[in-house]
Image (cartoon, grey):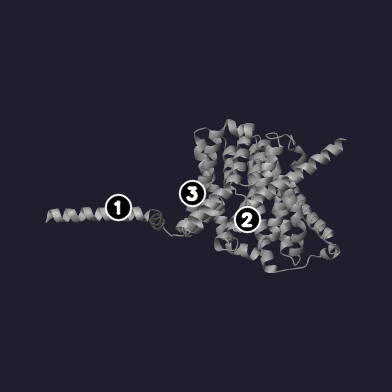
Amino acid sequence: MHISHELTQIAFVVVSALLGGMILVRLKQPVFLGYVAVGVLLGPSGFCVLETRDGISLLAELGILLLLFLIGLELDIKLFKDTWKKALMITSLQIGGVVLLMAGMFFFYKASWGLILLLGFIGALSSTAVAIKMLESSGELKTKAGRLTMSILIAQDLAFVPMILIVRACGENSLSGWIFLKVLFSVALLGGLIHILSRLGKYKLPFYKHIDVNSEMIALGALAFCFVFSACSGMLGLSAAYGAFIAGLVLGNSEHQKAMIRVTHPIQSLLMMVFFLSIGLLLDLSFIWKNLLLVGILVLGVTLGKVILNAVILRGLKYSWYESSFIAVTLAQLGEFSFLLASVGKEAAILDPFSEKLVVALTALSLGLSPIWHIIHQRLHDKIGIDSRSVRDFTAVLFGKERNIWCSFLNKCRLKQKESKK
């Protein structure tokens, strides 16, 4: 009877997630927002169909693992190699800028460096899944701005590995040279691998002929490859997600890339549904209602802060106002890895329960509002042509009529002044 109840519950959750996704797709919004909404409705804040997240937490973590695996699998190494220097520079400036802002805010509150770094890391990361969806919907995925955005997202995903190491070390009060050596090792290993794979070209996997019997064997072989690399990475003291990304890179540069993507994508999509569903389960609506003003101010502050910081960085690198603003708005949300960093921060006793709930609320709302900011930006661009290369050009488009009236008024005043002098 217990098993029957659990199966009924799972069936109800899957059907609800499907309906939520279908509604959001019909509204031309990212499908994951429907999964989050279903998680809220079925969780403790809604109808309590699922009272806890514990039952699906492992599947949610597997979803993130396979997300990084697929990012590595689909990564065009030659394209990334062309933009990696700028992507790493922009990502480093983003992380450094947000951490400095957090340090300034918490200087007066005597916060620990662990909390400052954790919140800085959470604020710097953006959502790969959301950004890709917005790039696809706007037709910008293959453009110069879209390619640079993808490179920045990949660089942020790679930065997630040293972030976890640093946060855990801060919780253990052991931020030593050994931690920095592990970080340098992970970065050097990845850089060396990308360099080697970019020179090798396409190659055959030695084990592929043994699994090229049917699609089920190919899928199992790809997942086994991913999990082996993840386990080895974990045993080396790095992150399992780092190993999954490395596995994706190795398979993605082979001749069998398309077959691997075709068979593993449905599995990853299912697990990502579970992950975003679990976000909805974590979201406490009563907490948001009780702290509505604080949450609203922080969501707006985080969004505007990230947009301004990213736009300034990109503009400083000589990108046009349209490219800078487009990329900045696309990266304005907090990322799915923010949830994992919050969990690590809680385990390391850096975040208290109130702060964890606040981070979850901010991230979920930031993800939900991100498509709205993107639509506003696109409409602004379509209506007033926000592709100017200077502030003067942009203000001329926005306030050209008023400026002309004001200039005309000033010219008349000058003429009258000259006539009175004569």
Q: Can residue 236 be seen in this view?
A: no
Rendering coords of residue 252 (x, y %): 72, 62
Callout 2: helix, strand or loop? helix
Q: What element carries label 1?
A: helix
Residue 120 spot, x, y in % from top left: 57, 43
Between disc 3 and disc 2, the foreground one is 2
Q: Where is residue 298 in the image (x, y as percent from the top left)?
A: 54, 39
Task: Specify which label sits upstream in the sequence, 2 or 1.
Answer: 2
Residue under the point 79% across and 39% down: 9
Which residue in the rendered view is the most extreme toward the top?
290
For the N terminus, which image quadrant?
Answer: top right
Question: Viewed as shown, does residue 222 lie left or right of 302?
Answer: right
In the foreground, 309 or 405: 405
Q: Label 2 amino acid? A: Ile
Q: What residue type is labelled 3?
A: Ile
For label 2, the crowd category at 10 Å Cα-Cα, with few meaning under 14, some 14 to 19 and many 20 or more, is some
Query: Looking at the image, is 104 positioned above or below residue 27?
Result: above
Residue at point 76% right, 45% down?
14
Q: Earlier in the sequence, mark 1 or mark 3?
A: 3
Residue 113 is situated, as x and y percent measured from the top left of the image, at 57, 38
Q: How far apart are marks 3 and 2 (CA)?
A: 21 Å
Residue 132's disc is 2
| Image position of 217 with respect to 65: above or below | below
Q: Quadrant of the C terminus?
A: bottom left
Label disc, if present, on residue 308 of the rendered structure = 3
Q: Mark 1 points at which residue?
A: 406
Q: Which amino acid type is marked by label 1?
A: Trp
Element under label 3?
helix
